[in-house]
Every structure is written in structure tokens, then in C-alpha cells.
Image (cartoon, rainbow, N blue to C red):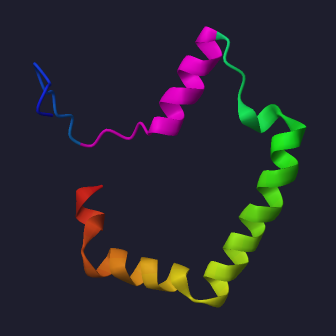
Amino acid sequence: MQNARKVIRIDKCFTTAADMFLYFGQRTGIPSPFMNPTFLRQYVPRMLAGTAKKTDQRRYLDDTLDFLDQQLMRKL
């Protein structure tokens, strides 16, 4: 923000970077990597392995409790 000429803050904006990339990618002709079978062959097994590891180490439970502890529900 040091070089920004003007900063506009938007409260409660639910658009994510992934949403913007998918929208503008479609409009500009950039293909989504999720339509590429080679990408999916690499991505899906690693995603499942990561999910299994986080479940085994109870990271999802920790993340949920941390979320509730910090009362982030009010900020949504």
C-alpha cells in the first residue's frame, strides 16, 4: 500500500482471488487448469493425501476451534 495512489476498502466483500481469476480467465481466454487432465492426475491424489494428513493430525478441529475462539463469525 505504500505505492498506492488511492486505497478503497470494501467491507464484507466475498469475492476471492480464485473467483476473480476464474471470471477474468474465462473472459480473456485463459484456460482453467482444472480442465487439464494432466493437472488433475497430479492434484487430486496430493489433495486427498493432504486432507487425510490434516484429518489424522486433527488440524481441521484445531482450525475450527481457533476460528470460534477468535469470534470471527461476527466479521462475516
| Left or right, 51 with reference to 27 | right
Residue 14, horizontal then vertical, whole percent:
38, 41
| Left or right, 34 with reference to 75 | right
Residue 55, horizontal then vertical, whole percent:
64, 83
Residue 34 vertical placement versus 59 (above, below): above
Residue 34, horizontal then vertical, whole percent:
76, 38
Residue 21, horizontal then vertical, whole percent:
53, 28
Looking at this view, name the residue that lies furthest to the top. 28
Task: Identify the residue at image location x=72%, y=62%.
Answer: 47
Magenta residue span:
12-28
Looking at this view, name the residue that lies furthest to the bottom. 57
Task: Identify the residue at image location x=80%, y=57%.
Answer: 44
Q: Is residue 17 magenta?
A: yes
Q: Is residue 64 magenta?
A: no
Residue 50 vertical placement versus 10 (above, below): below
Quadrant assignment, res 49: bottom right
Looking at this view, name the residue that lies furthest to the front. 3
Residue 60 vertical placement versus 16 (above, below): below
Q: Which quarter of the rendering shows the C terminus?
A: bottom left
The image shows a total of numbered marks equal to 0
Task: Identify the residue at image location x=76%, y=63%.
Answer: 46
Which residue is at the front of the view, 3 or 25? Answer: 3
Q: Which quarter of the rendering shows the N terminus?
A: top left
Task: Identify the residue at image location x=53%, y=37%.
Answer: 18
| Left or right, 29 with reference to 11 | right
Which residue is at the front of the view, 51 or 3? Answer: 3
Q: Main secondary structure of the magenta part?
A: helix
